[in-house]
Image (cartoon, grey):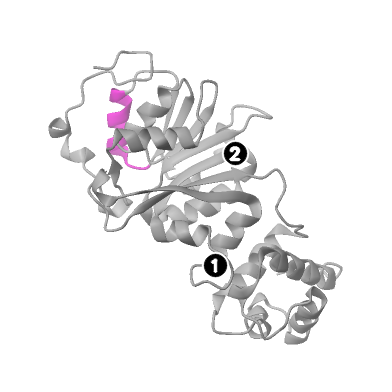
Amino acid sequence: MYSEGNGRRGKKEDECGVSRLHFPKKRLGQHFLKDKNIIRKIVSAGAVKEGDTVLEIGPGRGALTGALLETGATVVAVEADRALSGYLKGVFTTDKLRLVTGDALKVSFAEFSGGIGTRLKAVSNLPYNISGPLLAKFLEERAAFSVLVLMFQKEVAERIVAHPSTKEYGTLSVYAQAFTEAKIAFNIPAHLFTPPPKVTSSVVVFKVLDEPKVEIADERLFKAVVRASFGTRRKTLLNSLVFLGYEKAVVAEALFHAGIDPGRRGETLSIDEFAALTRAFFALTAQSGDIP
């Protein structure tokens, strides 16, 4: 029995008594974590403590939410499922929880920071069906965060930390590793969720860097270069980068100035090389304003 005002449940929760409205919804990618030891490990991975403000995406039935609140932190929970949002309002009776009903992809994370100079922590079991776009949004709004502790399907987690010239290496790898220090903290077997997903899950910890790991002339151009380089994996960089909108001669010149063989493919480039290529394109086109 959880008491009012301390971030705990205001009434006893019986798994059998949960309304069908609160059952996991496949269309929303819901898989509710039920193992208390794993939940404690997730909270510990974020070093969550009293005074922190934590953003949780997809709180579900509130198992992780309750553990976060027990640290004394303030929790901002964004839940797209209106039925679950209503359920959570009845479960938690503390002013330490701010519940936002809506699409996490459409809200501004920075507005939850609580003031200038205050940085959030994000601790979330992300909905599987939008985990990629959510990570992209976290990286886009990374200035609002000090650390991200996020759960993904294991194969997505492996893509995030992958190295060049591996099949897992791609745009997520470059974006994440350019702006954060990312590592897989631990894996979670499927049977610890309701319903069990068909895959193993992984918790990834991202330490947000104050400055990018590499010198990036223009972040929008950097992302466009990376995206084009991986857009057609079987093509050489000379051929794939024309999809940026540049003439092939400009692409060849940029590759030359970056010291990159035009016959290479995108998945062989390091983050430093992507940054060098971006700087080369920027130098060639900035004056003309011809940046894609």
**Residue at the outermost top position:** 4
Q: SS for tag 2?
A: strand
For the residue marked with disc 2, what is the amino acid?
Answer: Phe
Horizontally, residue 146 falls left or right of residue 278, namely left
Magenta residues? Answer: 80-91
Which secondary structure dominates the residues rendered in magenta?
Answer: helix
State the residue position of label 2: 145
Q: Are marks 2 and 1 in contact (CB under 8 Å)?
A: no
Q: Position of residue 291 (x, y in %)?
A: 75, 69
Horizontally, residue 227 falls left or right of residue 77, namely right
**Residue at the outermost left position:** 16
State the residue position of label 1: 170
Q: Position of residue 175 (x, y in %)?
A: 60, 58
- How many circles with numbers are drawn on the protein? 2
Q: Earlier in the sequence, mark 2 or mark 1?
A: 2
Asked if residue 89 is among those painted magenta in the image, a careful observer would answer: yes
